[in-house]
Amino acid sequence: AQSVTQPDIHITVSEGASLELRCNYSYGATPYLFWYVQSPGQGLQLLLKYFSGDTLVQGIKGFEAEFKRSQSSFNLRKPSVHWSDAAEYFCAVSGTASKLTFGTGTRLQVTL
Amino acid sequence: KAGVTQTPRYLIKTRGQQVTLSCSPISGHRSVSWYQQTPGQGLQFLFEYFSETQRNKGNFPGRFSGRQFSNSRSEMNVSTLELGDSALYLCASGPGVMNTEAFFGQGTRLTVV
């Protein structure tokens, strides 16, 4: 069965500081990996996705993520956080089944 | 291009009632999936439809059902509502196989009292 672990429930960073959100997945074959962001009361917005090829993927809003097969990780990074990045971030995995399996999310707080 | 539209946005129902939620996918998308989001259980997959056929179903009781119409619009129904069904219900659409792309709507917030 596929699963995702986001070990950090809540992270606080200062505006302008760098950010790394951790994601570990479990899947028997090569997974499809995603990062979504959710603002309060809103739906999910896709930040980026990894299917194959280059293990460093670029997304929207200046985010990037790196797929590391040996560590079963897909961590999300941003070099300089803006106050508008405060939200909840979800890592997700899917495989041959069409459903997405989500992690429990990481809530990002940005201090000014 | 309009995004995924879910109606209604908010709903209050009484325990024991039934409810129907609607989802209009992005134009041209043929795949629709439903997810339940609660503080305790997080985001959980309910079911997925492609070209009016249910392709996959999550681990939910039979009170949860869905369907997809020929125009790709989808509805999900919950019968005999329980307090624990209070959640944000999210619909996602995709152009084909869901695991390549999923665009989510704003969700329907269901409160069961």
Image (cartoon, coloured by chain):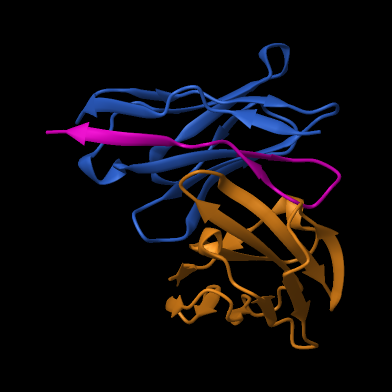
Chain colours: A blue, B orange
Quadrant of residue A51 within the rendered picture: top right
Locate residue A32 relative to residue A109 in the image: left or right.
Answer: right
A38 is within the stretch colored magenta: no
* Residue A14 falls left or right of residue B109: left
- Residue A107 in magenta stretch: yes
- Do we see residue B1 in this rendering? no
When the figure is inspected, residue B19 is found, relative to residue A37, above or below; the finding is below
Residue at (76%, 34%) from the top-left corner? A2
Q: Residue at x 61, y 81 (%)?
A: B18
Quarter placement of the C terminus of chain B: bottom left
User: Which image quarter: residue B54?
Assistant: bottom right
Against A12, is B54 above or below? Answer: below
Q: Nearer the viewer, residue A81 or A27?
A: A27
Q: Is residue B37 positioned above or below B78 on the image?
A: above
Q: Nearer the viewer, residue B35 or A57?
A: B35
Q: Is residue A87 above or below residue B113?
A: above
Report x, y in % for residue B34: 66, 64
Kindly indicate the quadrant of the structure image that contains residue A94: top right
* Rendering coords of residue A15 (x, y %): 19, 31
Count of numbered tags: 0
Q: Residue B68: x, y in percent?
A: 77, 80
Q: Residue furthest left?
A: A112
x, y percent for residue B73: 69, 83
Look at the image and tell me whether residue B40 can be seen. Answer: yes
Residue at the extreme top of the image, as rendered: A70
Q: In percent of the image, x 61 and y 75: which residue is there?
A: B26
Q: Which residues are magenta?
A: A92-112
